[in-house]
C-alpha cells in the first residue's frame, strides 16, 4: 500500500491541494496527516474542513501544537505564531475547533507510529533536531518506523540492532529502502511552510508493499501552488509566490 504522508500544512490551501493531487497521481491509497493544519497560513478553515473530510473517508490524523493552541490558550507560541493563532480562532467554527481538540497526540498502526513531534512526550512538542533527540524518541516506542513532522525539514534516522544511530538527508524523488533489521525515524518536511531552504511544498510516500529491502518506490511529484501566509502585521496581508509541490521523502518499508 502506498501511504501519502503530510505534515505542517499550516493553513496553506494551495500547497495542500497540489500535494493531494500529486499524491493521487502517484497512486496513494491511504492518507496520514501528522498535525499542524493551522497557523501562519491564510486558509485554516478550508484546510481543517479538507482534513475532516479525509478522516471521514478513512485517513488518519494526529494533533500538532498549533492545532492544540486553537483551544488551549496555555500553549506557548512565538509572537508570529501567536498572532496567527489568535486570528485563526476567529476563522474556525465550533465543528472545526472540536475536531482539532479531539485529535489524538499519536497513532500506532501495524509496525508504524505516527506523531507530530518527539514520541517520548508528544504533548510537550519537543523537536527532533539531531541524533540525541531521535534516540530519545525511538526509545519511547517499539515501532519499526516512526513518522513525525514539527521541524519543517526532512531528515531520516536509522538505528541498527547494535544501537548505532545515523542520520541523513533524503533526496527528492529517490526511494530509500527501509531494511527490516533496523528501526527508522522519518522527520517529514512541511507542506505549508518549508524551512530547509527549498520553498517547495514537501510530502512523503511510504510504500508498505515493497518487501525486497533493496527496492523502493522511486517517485517524484511536482506541481505549481501559490503560497499565501499571514504576515506578522495584525492586518491581513498576503504574498503570492510560485512554488512546486515536491515529494522530498519517498520510501519503502519492511513488510508489516
Image: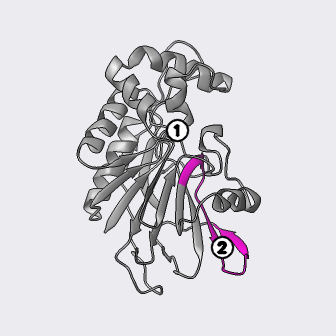
Q: Which residues are magenta?
A: 148-168
Q: Secondary structure at mark 1?
A: loop
Q: Is residue 62 left or right of residue 134?
A: left
Place residue 154 in its image quadrant. Answer: bottom right
Q: Secondary structure at mark 2?
A: strand
Q: Where residue 159 is drawn, which disc sits there?
A: 2
Place residue 131 in its image quadrant. Answer: bottom right
Q: What colour scheme does the image use?
A: one colour
Residue visible at 46% across and 20% down in the picture: 88
Residue visible at 45% across and 43% down in the picture: 62
Q: Is residue 39 at least partly visible in the picture?
A: no
Q: Residues within 10 Å of mark 2 (few under 14, many from 20)?
A: many
Vertical placement of residue 255 versus 93, above or below: below
Q: Is residue 108 left or right of residue 186?
A: left
Which residue is the site of mark 1? 64
Q: How many marks on residues? A: 2
Q: Position of residue 6 (x, y in %)?
A: 43, 50
Q: Quadrant of the N terminus?
A: bottom left
Amino acid at each position: 500500500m502506498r501511504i501519502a504522508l503530510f505534515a505542517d500544512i499550516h493553513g496553506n490551501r494551495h500547497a495542500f491541494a497540489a500535494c493531494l493531487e500529486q499524491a493521487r497521481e502517484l497512486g496513494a491509497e491511504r492518507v496520514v496527516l501528522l498535525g499542524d493544519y493551522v497557523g501562519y497560513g491564510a486558509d485554516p478553515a478550508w484546510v481543517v474542513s479538507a482534513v475532516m473530510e479525509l478522516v471521514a473517508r478513512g485517513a488518519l490524523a494526529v494533533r500538532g501544537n498549533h492545532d492544540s493552541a486553537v483551544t488551549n490558550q496555555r500553549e506557548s507560541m512565538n509572537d508570529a505564531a501567536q498572532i496567527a493563532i489568535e486570528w485563526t480562532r476567529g476563522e474556525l467554527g465550533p465543528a472545526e475547533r472540536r475536531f482539532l481538540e479531539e485529535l489524538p497526540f499519536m497513532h500506532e498502526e501495524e509496525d508504524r507510529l505516527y506523531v507530530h513531534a518527539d514520541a517520548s512526550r508528544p504533548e510537550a512538542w519537543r523537536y527532533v533536531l539531531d541524533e540525541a533527540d531521535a534516540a530519545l524518541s525511538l526509545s519511547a516506542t517499539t515501532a519499526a518506523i516512526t513518522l513525525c513532522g514539527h521541524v519543517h525539514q526532512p531528515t531520516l534516522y536509522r538505528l541498527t540492532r547494535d544501537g548505532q544511530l545515523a542520520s541523513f538527508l533524503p533526496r527528492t524523488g529517490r526511494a530509500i529502502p527501509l531494511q527490516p533489521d533496523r528501526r527508522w525515524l522519518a522527520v517529514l518536511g512541511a507542506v505549508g511552510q518549508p524551512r530547509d531552504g527549498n520553498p517547495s511544498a514537501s510530502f512523503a510516500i511510504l510504500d508498505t508493499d515493497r518487501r525486497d529491502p533493496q527496492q523502493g518506490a522511486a517517485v517524484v511529484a511536482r506541481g505549481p501552488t501559490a503560497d499565501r501566509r499571514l504576515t506578522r502585521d495584525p492586518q491581513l496581508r498576503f504574498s503570492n509566490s510560485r512554488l512546486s509541490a515536491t515529494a522530498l521523502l519517498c520510501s519503502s518499508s519492511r513488510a508489516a
